[in-house]
Amino acid sequence: MVPPGYDPTGRQKACGMAVTKEQVLACLQGINSPEGIPLPDTGTLSDVVATDGKVFFSISVDAAQVKAWEAVRERAEKAVRALPDVQSALVALTAERKARTPPGPTPPGARPAPRGDSVQGVPGVEAIIAVASGKGGVGKSTTAVNLALGLASLGLRVGILDADIYGPSLPKLLAIKERPQTLGGTRLKPITRYGLTVMSIGFLIDEETPMIWRGPMVISALTQMLREVEWGTLDVMVVDMPPGTGDAQLTMAQQVPLKGAVIVSTPQDLALIDARRGIAMFKRVNVPVLGVIENMSYFLCPHCGTRSDIFSHGGARHEAERLGVPFLGEVPLHMTIREKSDAGLPVVATEPDGPHAKIYRDIAARVRDQLKGGAGRAAPKIVIE
Ligand SMILES: Nc1ncnc2c1ncn2[C@@H]1O[C@H](COP(=O)(O)OP(=O)(O)O)[C@@H](O)[C@H]1O
Ligand SMILES: [Mg+2]
């Protein structure tokens, strides 16, 4: 029997010439849920975005059912890609966050093994480094952007990939409103801003969508952003990682061919405990830790310039020393950094002669030196309690 939506030769039926949302939905009628219900009737679909031959939508299911749905996601993506006039299709599977439900146990065998040498590099990209934090809100993205700009100011060709699926921030931090164009069918052309080559998962998903993306699901999106984007020739690609040290982060750390990781922490004890977990996570997947940055290290009053160590400044330096990883520098908590960052005018690019830009450039120089020096060849001493 010929399944709905397919012709007798097994090929997906064409749903019309110009790709519209309706046509994508009509095609998806031929894809069934694990319970045998046509996908558009399951209530799991997000809005379908279909512009200029690029199609994007997500399927949101209960976290307990994601395994059964992965095959549906794949079939849906393949079917949409096979439509005439579709240049690229990205279908994301998301698990809805349930209030106060702790994350379920890791399915047997799902925990990734330590990274071997099998992770392929990205052609044309010399070094990929992760900017990570044990928890969100510590200024990871602000640091990633200004670090990338600092590296560029040292004469390096720099790209930045926003892989923070929980809160993509590059569209905001770099004031990017346009969407990437496709090149020759399937490859995406990144955006260029302040001399950086930029790609964000935020270009592909709706800012407002509340969700948890689980490791195995995000890999296809991450792989696409690494390998199907025309990055060109880069000395360094900075990856703004999702915060935390769960399976999603671990899987990403394992899948991306990282030369090293930079850990951002605030000085408080709680943040440092999370930072320590981050360091341990990269160690587990054999990614060298290039160093720790203390963000919001001390408060600089924008009016009088008085400095106060409101979060017991210096915690990250001590922690880095204790763990035997390099300490890369301290960034103050300063109104200018916040205002500029949130307005899409990062300080390193817009106030290059100011004191904050210098701090980030110094940190960038240390990161560059770590990369040059083959950081991590001698594995850092890790003390985990
Ligand atoms: N050094 C800093 N001084 C002042 N504000 C900062 C600093 N670093 C980050 N911020 C602000 O803190 C908030 C969270 O920063 P963000 O980079 O988005 O964090 P994350 O990526 O870790 O969630 C933003 O409003 C940002 O502008
Ligand atoms: Mg962020």
Image: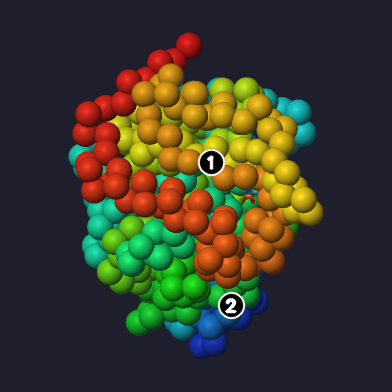
In the image, what residue occupies the spot 32% across and 64% down?
A: 156
Query: Which of the colour schemes (rainbow, by chain, secondary structure, one colour) is used?
Result: rainbow
Dot 2 beta carbon under 8 Å from ligand 2: no
Foreground of the two, 78 or 207: 207
Q: Which residue has dot 2 on it?
A: 178
Residue 84 falls in image quadrant: bottom left
Q: Secondary structure at mark 1?
A: strand
- In this rendering, the answer to whether 146 lies above or below 213 is below
Q: Quadrant of residue 178?
A: bottom right
Q: Nearer the viewer, residue 169 or 183?
A: 169
Q: Residue at x 36, y 46 (%)?
A: 366
| Residue 330 tag number | 1
Residue 306 shows in the view: yes
SS at badge 2 = loop
| Mark 2: amino acid | Glu
Q: Quadrant of the N terminus?
A: bottom left
Q: Nearer the viewer, residue 201 or 135?
A: 135
The CA distance from mark 1 to mark 2 is 33 Å
**Quarter where residue 124 is shown:** bottom left
Please determine whether, in this image, residue 126 is positioned above or below residue 130: below
Percent x, y for residue 334?
68, 50
Q: Position of residue 186 (x, y in %)?
A: 38, 74
Q: Amino acid at mark 1?
A: Glu
Q: Are marks 1 and 2 in contact (CB under 8 Å)?
A: no
* Mark 1 surroundings within 10 Å by alpha-carbon count, few (fewer than 14), some (14 through 19), many (20 or more): many
